[in-house]
Image (tube, rainbow, N blue to C red):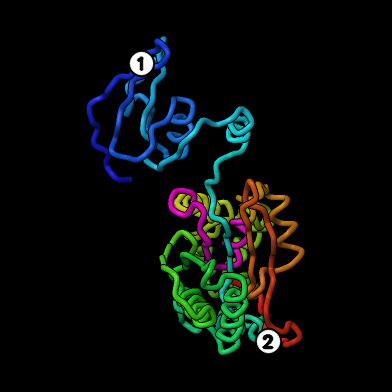
């Protein structure tokens, strides 16, 4: 907000009541009832910091830097005080990456112990199918968020498959929003179990199989890895950034399946039972769209929607 230089106050007499006037170089002078509203709307520190008013036998006026004018009615004031101020984006669209090479290999090599082929999880690329899935998402989003109401910013996980998904989405959008790479929305850390199939974990770490069965999928944390609540902690920090920087914007997040469910768990206030129930009902699909829209609060409008044929056995893969 631009700095306002205070000018000397001046006094007028209206009906025998002293009316103090002060000017800050803006274009509207208003009574205290309206300037309270203006202060709230403009997020100024306080009225007294700018006007030095005293509630005595006088009426204080000051200038609203946004040019707000007129006194609010009782009905307007009630509506303002009852309605929460918007702190969220207008739209929050969360997308899982397209089919990755690991997704495809996990399906083909279930009987093998290790399907990583020595490649870091962070460096796993999309398949050709995954690229097409992601392009379809961009084409669909262009219909919803065109030039007149575009996506303002994209937050993307630093992993290769999510960044490739983002580029294909942008190709389908026909315009390029601002981009921020954020490690807080990266995939869950699998620790010593990274790249291992269920068969491989049983063969190499049988004690971890027993511990996971005891602690449950939600709270289990593999050595060197994360639990689901661990992921939610960093997503919670990410949401704080969204609240601070993205009010009223259209925000796109490109991330991973566990992260998508982490968003839902936080925004919809799930516990372990609700999380596991949704996780059990259906995997978060590759290149799927989960959409929240602000209507007094963020409300779920769409979950796990895809824009490709699910009849293709190679088009939907489960996994990380």
- Binning the other alpha carbons within 10 Å of mark 1 as few (below 14), some (14 to 19) or many (20 upward) gives few
Q: Is residue 107 left or right of residue 18?
A: right
Mark count:
2
Q: Is residue 102 above or below residue 30?
A: below
The residue furthest front is: 15
Most foreground residue, 252 or 106: 252
Q: Position of residue 23 (x, y in %)?
A: 30, 32
Q: Is residue 168 above or below residue 79?
A: below
Q: Which numbered tag is attached to residue 290? A: none
Most foreground residue, 226 or 127: 127
Q: Quadrant of residue 131?
A: bottom right
Would you say residue 118 sits in the magenta stretch?
no
Q: Position of residue 105 (x, y in %)?
A: 60, 84
Q: Is residue 155 left or right of residue 285?
A: left
| Label 1 to label 2: alpha-carbon separation | 81 Å
- Binning the other alpha carbons within 10 Å of mark 2 as few (below 14), some (14 to 19) or many (20 upward) gives few
Q: Can residue 222 be seen at all in this image of the molecule?
A: yes
Q: Under tag 1, what secondary structure? A: strand
Q: Is residue 144 above or below residue 220?
A: below
Q: Which numbered tag is attached to residue 314? A: 2
Q: Position of residue 73 (x, y in %)?
A: 59, 30
Most foreground residue, 31 or 219: 31
Which comes before the other along the chain, label 1 or label 2? 1
Q: Under tag 2, what secondary structure? A: loop
Range shown magenta: 243-263
Mark closer to the observer (1, 2)? 1
Would you say residue 252 sits in the magenta stretch?
yes
Which residue is label 1 attached to?
13
Q: Quadrant of residue 275?
A: bottom right
The residue shown at (47%, 67%) is: 154
Most foreground residue, 122 or 262: 262
Quadrant where the N terminus lies? top left
């Amino acid at each position: 907000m631009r700095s306002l230089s205070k000018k000397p106050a001046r006094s007028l007499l209206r009906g025998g009541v002293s009316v103090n006037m002060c000017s800050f170089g803006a274009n509207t002078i208003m009574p205290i009832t309206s300037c309270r509203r203006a202060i709230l709307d403009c997020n100024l520190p306080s009225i007294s910091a700018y006007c030095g008013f005293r509630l005595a036998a006088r009426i204080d006026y000051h200038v609203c830097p946004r040019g707000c004018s007129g006194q609010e009615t009782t009905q307007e004031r009630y509506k303002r005080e009852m309605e929460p101020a918007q702190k969220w984006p207008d739209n929050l669209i969360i997308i899982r990456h397209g089919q990755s090479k690991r997704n495809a290999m996990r399906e083909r090599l279930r009987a093998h112990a290790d399907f990583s082929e020595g490649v870091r999880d962070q460096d796993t690329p999309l398949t050709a199918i995954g690229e097409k899935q992601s392009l379809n998402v961009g084409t669909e989003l262009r219909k919803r968020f065109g030039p007149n109401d575009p996506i303002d910013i994209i937050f993307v996980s630093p992993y290769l498959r999510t960044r490739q998904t983002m580029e294909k989405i942008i190709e389908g959008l026909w315009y390029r929003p601002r981009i921020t790479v954020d490690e807080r929305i990266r995939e869950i850390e699998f620790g010593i179990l990274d790249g291992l199939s269920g068969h491989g974990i049983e063969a190499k770490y049988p004690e971890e199989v027993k511990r996971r069965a005891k602690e449950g999928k939600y709270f289990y944390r593999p050595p060197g890895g994360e639990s689901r609540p661990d992921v939610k902690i960093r997503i919670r920090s990410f949401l704080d950034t969204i609240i601070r920087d993205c009010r009223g914007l259209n925000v796109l997040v490109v991330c991973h399946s566990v992260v998508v469910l982490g968003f839902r768990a936080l925004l919809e206030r799930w516990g372990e039972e609700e999380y596991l129930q949704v996780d059990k009902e259906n995997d978060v699909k590759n290149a799927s769209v989960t959409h929240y829209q602000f209507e007094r609060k963020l409300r779920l409008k769409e979950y796990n929607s895809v824009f490709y044929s699910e009849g293709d056995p190679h088009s939907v893969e489960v996994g990380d």
